[in-house]
Image: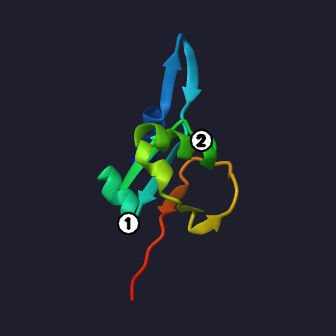
Amino acid sequence: MFIFVNLIAALSASLRTDGGRLEIIMAVKVYLFGQLKELTGLSEFMVEGISDTDGLMKELAGKFPKMKDIPCLVAVDREIIHSNALLREGQELALLPPFSGG
């Protein structure tokens, strides 16, 4: 029973109605590091309604215009990608700006 109640709660959090039409909204978790974390003031957040990594980057650049000036690698589920990737519900993304250290 407990699992069923949690499932209903999770589903209702990702459902929206639009004029009587039921729409499922996909959510992914995004982690920010280094300069990106400092720029946004966030280390992690959830984002909904983004279907691919290019869409995520456009959304973030709209919210944080200075992000366009910071090159970064994108990792999806701990694997660095080198081109646009489709996203699935529950995936974790990390934006990794250049870093140095010793």
State the quadrant of the C terminus.
Answer: bottom left
Q: Position of residue 39 (x, y in %)?
A: 34, 53
Which residue is painted at 38% across and 62% down in the image? Answer: 35
Q: Nearer the viewer, residue 99 or 94?
A: 99
Q: Earlier in the sequence, mark 2 or mark 1?
A: 1
User: Is residue 100 positioned above or below 7 on the image?
Assistant: below
The residue under the point 45% across, 32% down is 12
Q: Position of residue 42 (x, y in %)?
A: 32, 53
Q: CA distance from mark 2 to mark 1?
A: 22 Å
Q: Name the residue tied to disc 1.
A: 34
Check residue 55 in the rendering and tell me which mark sits there, or answer none. Answer: 2
Any part of residue 2 in sight? yes
Secondary element at image label 2:
helix
Query: Residue at image x 48%, y 69%?
Result: 98
Amino acid type shown at disc 2: Gly
Query: Tags 2 and 1 in contact by the CB under 8 Å rule?
Result: no
Residue count near mark 2 (Cα–Cα under 10 Å), binned few <14, some 14–19, many ≥20: some
Q: Position of residue 54 (x, y in %)?
A: 62, 46
Q: Residues within 10 Å of mark 1 (few under 14, many from 20)?
A: few
Tag of residue 94? none
Q: Secondary structure at mark 1?
A: helix
